[in-house]
Amino acid sequence: MGNKDVPIEKQLVLTGGVDNLFALSPIKFNSEGGLNKAKQKVPGGVIGLTGLTWLAEFLGIEALTLYATTELAGTPLLGGANFSQLPVKVHLENSTGVLGKSCYVGSTSNPIVLNLTTGTTAPPLPNKPITGTPPTPVFEEEREIQQELNGTFVDNSFAAPGASGCVLTLFGFIPISINGLVNTQSGLPSAAGNNETVQNFDAEVVSSHMAYGE
């Protein structure tokens, strides 16, 4: 997003159920489902995000490690194994609390909406079309699970809003909003046609009668 690249090194897992697997349907889930919170390490850390190089003198580089956690910001939709719509927000976190507890890019009211496809995108300029990879279907007879393996979802048509809730607290009691710093350093907000995500994925599908042992 913007001018920041974040590799997805820890697996994101979306768990839930749909009423119709072959039409665009909302994914339903309880407290044990939804999207897991997998922290991805952000290259450059807090200094790369804010440009505040002097923070290293007070806290040290190791204390300025930055993580990005993708969280759901609405109801995801699933359209078979070849399309998924994910409304998300990205939580920017640091173990020392340098950014505060509520530093986000995207929100429930203004989410980052990913329209993930295994087909070819049609993004606005300057991005050019990119193409995903449909997964390979494999039926696992022992567990009666339909697997969809080695697929690739892509989207380079989404927009990314500016940061919100990013607060630097000096000397433990002077809170200063640094949303502007984060936005300037990270190239946010970033209009559609300037962002891209590529996600390799596997999926497992089981029918409800198998899930409930009927």
Image (cartoon, rainbow, N blue to C red):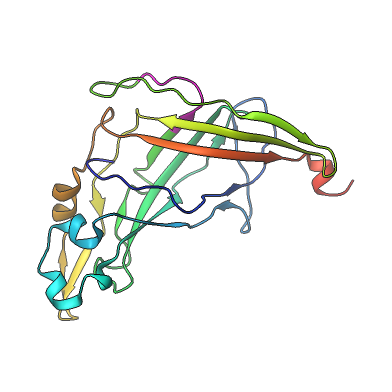
**Image point (27%, 68%), residue name:** 100
The N terminus appears in which quarter of the rendering? top left
**Image point (57%, 27%), residue name:** 82
Q: Position of residue 65 (x, y in %)?
A: 29, 65
Is residue 86 shown above or below 183?
Answer: above
Q: Is residue 79 left or right of residue 190?
A: right
Q: Is residue 16 left or right of residue 50?
A: right
Relative depth, front residue between 162 and 203:
203
Residue closest to the far right: 214
Q: Position of residue 21 (x, y in %)?
A: 68, 30
Q: Is residue 66 magenta?
A: no
The total of numbered circles placed on residues is: 0
- What type of secondary structure mainly makes up the magenta span? loop
Q: Position of residue 178 (x, y in %)?
A: 16, 60
Corner quadrant of residue 111 = top left
Relative depth, front residue between 65 and 212:
65
Q: Position of residue 146 (x, y in %)?
A: 74, 35
Q: Is residue 15 left or right of residue 96?
A: right
Is residue 97 shown above or below 31?
Answer: below
Q: Is residue 103 left or right of residue 210?
A: left
**Image point (44%, 41%), residue name:** 87
Residue closest to the far left: 54
Q: Is residue 119 magenta?
A: yes
Corner quadrant of residue 19 = top right
Q: Which residues are magenta?
A: 115-122
Relative depth, front residue between 128 and 78:
128
Is residue 174 shown above or below 151?
Answer: below
